[in-house]
Amino acid sequence: MEEEADTYNPRTVEEVFRDFKSRRTALIKALTTDVDEFFKQCDPEKENLCLYGFPTEEWEVNLPVEEVPPEIPEPTLGINFARDGLDKQEWLSLVAAHSDAWILAVAFYFGARVGFDRADRKRLFTMINDLPTIFEVVTGMGKTPASNHSSNKSKSNSKKGSESKPKNSKATQSKDKDGEEQGGDVPCGACGESYDDGFWICCDICEKWFHGKCVKITPARAEHIKQYKCPSCSNKRARQ
């Protein structure tokens, strides 16, 4: 971790934004698809732990760097201590909010270090602001009314007997009519990205849509799933 800033040094707005997106993807992965492993690693009995997201789209729970001041801003310290004192979803939401603050700090630190002017800072913020926050992805708050309409309409059109959709009532293999009519604004519940031309599946419990690749579901596997539960909803069920 200490060597990251020495080996990786984004200099343009596009490079800083790419770094931001990669770290964001890693953190969302930790808090959604890899949530069981993340939860396990945040043992309250251990010392102060931090959640790191890297430009490689990998995440890590580790102790903070010893160097003072650190090469780049550090994430929030001690996320593990509140793990068992809060409801799991509440704790994940808290970590998500702190993670949003951290990657924003890292992005604008890089911008300050290379001397972004007002126009560059504004452009970087606009690019960042077009993405749902980690908090919005984890809590589902980034879901717009249009997204709900698209999801519900897709499901109502894909009931048993419909010839225009796959057998699984919640699966879709591409940006369908609803996605086109709504401007493709439905975010993936795992990575937060909008519609693309790949395979998507919708959770029957929370009604969020997911890239098949983000939740490791293939079109062939989806055909045999009567009721799909996303990783977050599966975890909630397991605790009840």
Image (tube, grey):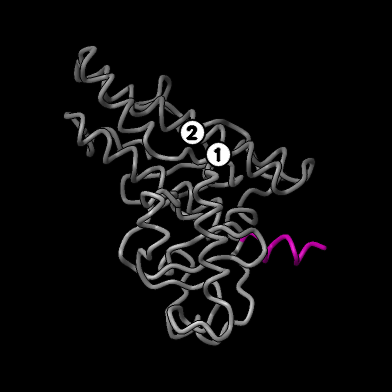
Nearer mark to the viewer, of 1 and 2? 1
Is 165 included in the stretch rendered in magenta? no
| Residue type indicated by callout 1 | Phe
Observer-nearest of 113 and 214: 214
Observer-nearest of 166 and 213: 166
The image position of residue 182, as x and y in percent, is: 41, 51
| Residue type indicated by callout 2 | Asp
Residue drawn at (60%, 60%) of the image: 207
In this rendering, would 26 be left or right of 17?
right
- In the rendered structure, are the residues bearing label 1 and label 2 in contact, judged by CB atoms less than 8 Å apart? yes
Observer-nearest of 216 and 131: 131
The image position of residue 113, as x and y in percent, is: 24, 19
Q: Secondary structure at mark 2?
A: helix
Q: In what quadrant of the picture does the C terminus appear? A: bottom right
Up-down relation of residue 70 to residue 154 (above or below): above
Is 235 included in the stretch rendered in magenta? yes
Residue drawn at (20%, 36%) of the image: 15
The outermost residue toward the top is: 118
Mark 1 burial class by Cα count in 10 Å: few <14, some 14-19, many 20+: many
Residue corresponding to mark 1 = 135
In this rendering, would 16 be left or right of 211?
left
The disc at residue 77 is none
User: Picture quarter containing residue 119?
Assistant: top left
The image position of residue 142, as x and y in percent, is: 53, 42
Residue corresponding to mark 2 = 100
**Mark sitting earlier along the chain (1/2):** 2
Mark 2 burial class by Cα count in 10 Å: few <14, some 14-19, many 20+: some
* Bounds of the magenta segment: 232-240
User: Picture quarter containing residue 206?
Assistant: bottom right
Q: In what quadrant of the picture does the N terminus appear? A: top left
